[in-house]
């Protein structure tokens, strides 16, 4: 049977490794759709904008998912990355070793369009599905993130995607 890989993209955590609401919303979605036919891949290393803790973000994400009932043997290696392009590149090197898998990329609603743009380019050979989990941010914070995403997409469209 074809395996589906649930890929949870990294997002902020505190310097102590406490996951943000954005992180938890992505991880809770992953846990809610996980089944025995799934593998799980968590992304995220370090970066001033999302993780300054001692361990990579993916470590905290995996620990959270294990507490939610996902079994250790269903986790693939972490993609230790610092941005969305690195996510896709590092995921590709992990996924290429597997045969006959499809990918479900889990991110946040505000991040979805940029993820699709990047992943559809870097992970062309794979069957991709995308989920943009609803963000429960206040309007001001949400609008700031949407504006950041629009600028990032504009930059990719004008300058190309480098990886």
Image (cartoon, rainbow, N blue to C red):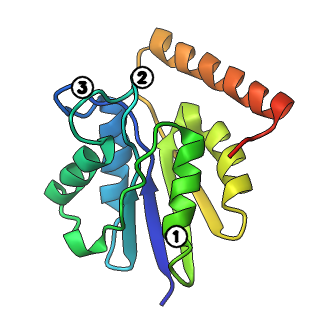
Who's the residue at 76% across and 33% down the image? 156
Give x and y (percent) for residue 14.
24, 25
- Which quadrant holds residue 17? top left
Q: Residue 95 got which mark?
A: 1
Give x and y (percent) for residue 120.
71, 55
Q: Earlier in the sequence, mark 2 or mark 3?
A: 3
Q: Are marks 2 and 1 in contact (CB under 8 Å)?
A: no
Q: Which residue is mark 2?
A: 49
Q: Secondary structure at mark 3?
A: loop
Residue 131 in view here: no
The crowding category of the residue bearing disc 3, from other C-alpha atoms within 10 Å (few below 14, some 14 to 19, many at least 20), is few
Q: Secondary structure at mark 2?
A: loop
Give x and y (percent) for residue 123.
66, 61
Q: Is residue 88 above or below residue 37?
A: above
Q: Is residue 58 above or below residue 23?
A: below
State the residue lying farthest toward the right. 158
Q: Which residue is mark 3?
A: 14
Q: Earlier in the sequence, mark 2 or mark 1?
A: 2
State the residue lying farthest toward the bottom. 1
Left or right? Give the position of 95 relative to 154. left
The crowding category of the residue bearing disc 2, from other C-alpha atoms within 10 Å (few below 14, some 14 to 19, many at least 20), is few
Who's the residue at 37% across and 32% down the image? 22
């Amino acid at each position: 049977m074809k395996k589906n890989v649930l890929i949870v993209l990294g997002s902020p955590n505190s310097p102590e490794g406490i996951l943000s609401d954005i992180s938890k919303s992505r991880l809770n979605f992953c846990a809610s759709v996980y089944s025995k036919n799934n593998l799980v891949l968590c992304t995220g290393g370090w970066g001033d904008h999302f993780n300054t803790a001692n361990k990579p973000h993916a470590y905290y994400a995996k620990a959270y998912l294990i507490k939610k009932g996902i079994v250790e043997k269903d986790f693939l290696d972490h993609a230790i990355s610092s941005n969305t392009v690195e996510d896709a590149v590092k995921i590709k090197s992990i996924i290429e070793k597997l045969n006959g898998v499809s990918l479900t990329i889990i991110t946040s609603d505000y991040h979805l369009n940029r993820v699709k743009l990047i992943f559809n380019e870097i992970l062309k050979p794979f069957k991709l599905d995308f989920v943009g989990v609803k963000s429960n941010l206040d309007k001001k914070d949400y609008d700031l993130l949407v504006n950041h995403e629009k600028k990032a997409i504009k930059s990719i469209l004008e300058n190309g995607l480098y990886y």
